[in-house]
Amino acid sequence: MGKKHELEVWIEAEVIDKSGKVIQRHRQKSRTWVRNWIVMLNRFMKNSGASVTKQDGTGISISYSIAIGTMLKVNAGAGIDTWGILVGSGTTPYSPDDYALANKIPNGTGDGQLSYGATQVFDVVDDGTSLSFKIVRTFSNEGSVNVTVNEVGLAVYANGYNILVARDVLSSSISVPAGSSLVIRYIVKLTYA
């Protein structure tokens, strides 16, 4: 029997209190690319435009004529809560037709909000048996009450539009106490040996 070659995506989360101590960890396999991602990937490979659904529910056609780097950009800056890694409190089950989080937690410093740090995309690492890279974002709770995270998403910035390409409902809720931070990592990994 041959070796298993698999492309997989994992979500990792850590809640870090104000003293820097990790108080909660979560890890689960991401299984929830949405229709937008498959349509965009197909159209890029065909060298043609793609019809996708924006986070507000309206359909758009994005052109292939723009460089690929502007089509799959996820490294959103601090304070941007429309693309990059997004978090929400919704528990609506996943559907391949999802185009937005069920209940996105907005960027901000008030109660029920999280301060969105910059989304970072790290270089590919080859460990001799797999290739992987991480997409990471830190969220800070600067309010006075706990914030509960139940869903995580990944949205790209494509031709000036913010398009959700992945949405996962977490297998268990994550509580982010006031004064604490939440680090979310998407890990894309190809095992080849």
Image: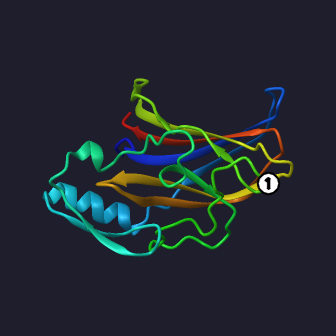
Q: Nearer the viewer, residue 36 or 18?
A: 18
Q: Is residue 151 left or right of residue 56?
A: right
Q: Quadrant of the C terminus?
A: top left
Residue drawn where x is 67% and y is 49% of the image:
108
Q: Nearer the viewer, residue 43 or 178?
A: 178
Instruction: Reply above or below: 155 against 79.
Output: below
Relative image position of residue 36 (x, y in whole percent): 37, 65
Residue drawn where x is 64% and y is 56% of the image:
106
Q: Dot 1 surroundings within 10 Å: few (below 14), some, or many (20 or more)?
A: some
Q: Is residue 157 left or right of residue 177?
A: left
Residue drawn where x is 29% and y is 61% of the image:
40
**Residue beneath disc 1:** 111
Relative image position of residue 70 (x, y in whole percent): 28, 46
Relative image position of residue 82 (x, y in whole percent): 50, 55
Q: How is the image coloured?
A: rainbow
Task: Determine whether the residue tagged by mark 1 lies in a helix, strand or loop.
Answer: loop
**Looking at the picture, which amino acid does disc 1 mark?**
Asp
Q: Quadrant of residue 147?
A: bottom right
Residue drawn where x is 39% and y is 25% of the image:
126
Instruction: Reply above or below: 59 against 145.
Output: below
